[in-house]
Image: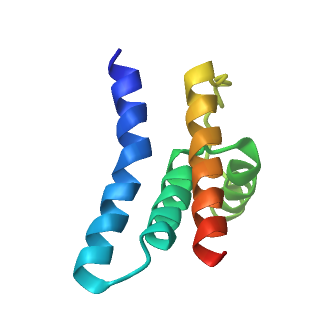
Amino acid sequence: MKKFWFLGGLLVAPFIVGWIANQVWQFPTLLVSGFVYIFLFLCLTPSGDFLSASANYETKKINPNHSVETVSKRSMDRLEILRLILLFLLGAACFYYSFN
């Protein structure tokens, strides 16, 4: 139940931020909401192995005695996938409707 409240907060909070930005600075509500949705999407996207591989190579090049930590594979559950898809779609929809 707590996860659904968190998901609801993620979906509603950018509209509130956009509305406040509209009231204070007269920015377009949907444009600000779109930026907040994309920012949340980027922050909540799990990091992948392709980013850590180059960092491990650079660390190994500087410090040859460095032992690389083991990478634990973790699959995303359905709610995390739903959260990422909704954030991306809402961000894209906000940008689409703010420019049309």
Q: Nearer the viewer, residue 14 or 53?
A: 14
Instruction: Pinpoint residue 52: horizontal percent, then vertical percent.
Output: 68, 49
Q: Residue drawn 32% across and 62% down?
A: 17
Q: Residue drawn 51% across and 56% down?
A: 37
Q: Residue drawn 57% across and 55% down?
A: 42
Can the viewer see residue 78 in this picture?
yes
Task: Name the quadrant containing residue 2.
Answer: top left
Instruction: Pinpoint residue 81: horizontal percent, then vertical percent.
Output: 63, 31
In this rendering, the count of numbered labels is: 0
Instruction: Pinpoint residue 3: horizontal percent, then vertical percent.
Output: 39, 23
Q: Nearer the viewer, residue 16 or 7?
A: 16
Residue that extends furthest to the bottom in the rendered view of this protein: 25
Q: Is residue 26 above or below residue 29?
A: below
Can the viewer see residue 65 in this picture?
no
Residue that extends furthest to the top in the rendered view of this protein: 1
Q: Is residue 84 above or below residue 3?
A: below
Residue that extends furthest to the front in the rendered view of this protein: 100
Scheme of image coloration: rainbow
Q: Is residue 10 above or below residue 78?
A: below
Point out the image quarter for the C terminus. Answer: bottom right
Task: Name the quadrant containing residue 80.
Answer: top right
Q: Residue drawn 36% across and 32% down?
A: 6
Q: Nearer the viewer, residue 39 or 71?
A: 39
Q: Is residue 77 above or below residue 83?
A: above
Instruction: Pinpoint residue 31: horizontal percent, then vertical percent.
Output: 50, 72
Point out the image quarter for the N terminus. Answer: top left
